[in-house]
Image: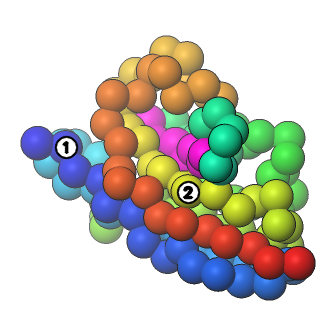
Amino acid sequence: QVQLVESGGGSVQSGGSLRLSCAASGYTYSSYCMGWFRQAPGKEREGVAAIDSDGSTSYADSVKGRFTISQDNAKNTLYLQMNSLKPEDTAMYYCAADVSPSPFFPLGLGYNYWGQGTQVTVSS
């Protein structure tokens, strides 16, 4: 079955960087769309970035220029490089996968497979 396992979260100071990873298994990775989503306490889940099977990417306006989504198909792994982190980036970050999510982004409604999440905390 499809499994997604996130890692790389942690606590950093404002301006710092983190790289999240999502190891995928149980399906043909290269044929799926992948996304990163986050949810802060008391807030709704929001899309952070997504990449489709052709490699096209989408980003939330709040992270453009600071975050980069990428993937290594040979390793079945999705990444999120986060630079210039801000306290408002604090949230639980989840990766998600689906063969044809609708919508693709920014809502996560179209994704059927989710990881367990990794916590990112940014202090000022």
At a point 35% along the width and 54% down the height, the residue shown is 116
Residue 112's place in the image compared with 88, above or below, is above
Q: Nearer the viewer, residue 54 or 19?
A: 19
At a point 77% along the width and 40% down the height, the residue shown is 60
Q: Nearer the viewer, residue 107 or 116?
A: 116
| Quadrant of the drawing holding the N terminus | top left
Q: Which residue is mark 2?
A: 92
Q: CA distance from mark 1 to mark 2?
A: 21 Å
Label placed on residue 2: 1
Q: Amino acid at mark 2?
A: Met
Q: Position of residue 105 (x, y in %)?
A: 62, 27
Q: Nearer the viewer, residue 27 or 44?
A: 44
Mark 1 vs 2, N-terminal side = 1
Q: Position of residue 49 (x, y in %)?
A: 64, 45
Counting other residues with Cα less than 10 Å from the Cα at mark 2, is it few (<14), some (14-19), or many (20 or more)? some
Q: Position of residue 36 (x, y in %)?
A: 55, 47
- The overriding secondary structure of the stretch rendered in magenta is strand
Q: Residue furthest front?
A: 42
How many numbered marks have been drawn onto this rendered protein structure?
2
Q: Where are the magenta residues, as a range?
A: 31-39
Q: Residue furthest top?
A: 102
Residue 53's place in the image compared with 48, above or below, is above
On screen, residue 47 versus residue 54, left or right, reads right
